[in-house]
Image (spheres, rainbow, N blue to C red):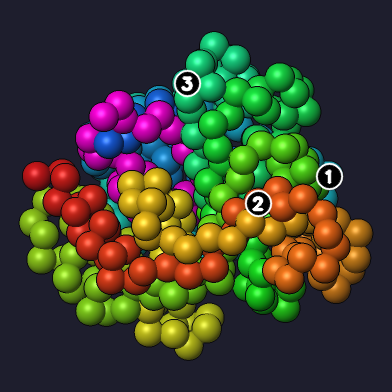
Amino acid sequence: MEPIKIIQDCDPGHDDAIAILLAGRNPRIQQLGITVVAGNQTLDRTTVNALNVCQYLGLDVPVYAGCDRPMIRDKVTAGDIHGKTGLDGPDFAPLTRQAEKKHAVSYLIDTLMASDGDIMLLPTGPLTNIGMAMRLEPRIVPKIKRIVLMGGSFSYGNVSPAAEFNIMADADAAHVVFSSGCPITMVGLDVTRKVLCLPSAVERMAKIDNPAGRLFTDLMRFFNKTQKEVFGWEGGPLHDPVTIASILDPDLLKTQPMHTEIDIRSVQSYGRTNCDVFGYLKKEPNVDVAVDIDVPRFWDIIEQGIRNYA
Ligand code: BDR
Ligand code: CA
C-alpha cells in the first residue's frame, strides 16, 4: 500500500509535538513537510519548537515558517498551557538545523500545485497558513485530497463557552477554509476531550525506552502540570495527535456530515464552529464532524507510534 502523503501545519505546542512524533517513522505515512504558524506561541518559538522535536527524534522532514499573526484579528497565544517557550518540559540540545528559506504559504501552494491531488493537510493550529494559501492561489483547493484538522466543537469551547482555541485564534482563516469546498474532517473538542492523558497513560509510555518514549514523557509531565493548575484536571486532552491517528485507523472516529459555518460576526460566540447537527438549515453538509472516538484504540496507536522509534 502506498503511504499517505501529508503536510502537517502546526503551532507546537505539546500536543502538536506528539502529532509530529506519531507521523514520523510511521511506514504508512509520508511526512512531506511541516509548516508552522503562530498560535500556542509566537512564530519564532513555534518554529524553533518544531525544529527541536524533529532534531530530537531524528526526523529530517523540512520545516517551513509561515504566518506570524492571524489574517485580521489580534494575535493570541496559549502560554498558560504550553509554557514560556510553547514547549516547556524537555531539555533540547542546541539546534543544529534551520527552517527552510521558503515561506510556508509558498511551500503549500507550490507543493499542492505540483501534486497529483494526493496530499492530505493535517492542521493542528490556527488555519492562517492554509487560509492564506487558498486566497493567494485558489487552484490549490481541488488539489487537496482532504483536510483533517484539530479544531472547533459542536458542543462547547475551551477558550470561551462557544469557541475552541485554534478556530478562535484565526476565525477569518477558518472561515476561508471551511467555506472552500475542500473535503474536511473536523476533529474537535467533542472527541479530543475524551482522550485524557492521565498519569496511567504517561507511565505506560514512560516504560518504552527510546527517544520518543522519553520525549512523550517529558512533554506530558509538564502539560499535565499546567492542566492541573489551569483546569484542575489530572490529565489533559491530547488533542492534536487524534488527527494523525484517524488517518492511520479509519475506524478510530465516528463522523457525521454536517453543514458547518464559522461565527466571525458575533461577540459572545466569535470563533464558534456552528455545526448543524440536526440539519435545521437544509444546507449541503461541508464537513465530516467527529462525534465519537474509540479511546483504547487511540492509546494503542500512540504506543505503537512511540515504539516505531526502536
Ligand atoms: C488546540 O489548542 C492548542 O493549544 C492545542 O495545541 C490544540 O491544537 C486545542 O484547543
Ligand atoms: Ca496545536
For the residue labelled by badge 3, is the local secondary structure a helix, a strand or a loop?
Answer: loop
Percent x, y for residue 105? 63, 26
Q: What residue is disc 3 on?
A: 100
Q: What residue is disc 2 on?
A: 287
Q: Earlier in the sequence, mark 1 or mark 2?
A: 1
What amino acid type should be assigned to the residue bearing mark 3? Glu
Residue range in magenta is 1-27
Q: Earlier in the sequence, mark 1 or mark 3?
A: 1
What amino acid type should be assigned to the residue bearing mark 2? Val
Q: What residue is disc 1 on?
A: 72
Ligand 2 has an atom within 8 Å of the beta carbon of the residue at disc 3: no
Towards the viewer: 57 or 205: 205
Q: Earlier in the sequence, mark 3 or mark 2?
A: 3
Relative to 14, is 260 on the left or the right?
Answer: right
Percent x, y for residue 128? 69, 40
User: Badge 1 local density, few (<14 within 10 Å), some, or many (20+)?
Assistant: few
Q: CA distance from mark 3 to mark 2?
A: 32 Å
Q: Residue at x 42, y 57 (%)?
A: 242
Q: Residue at x 14, y 51 (%)?
A: 307
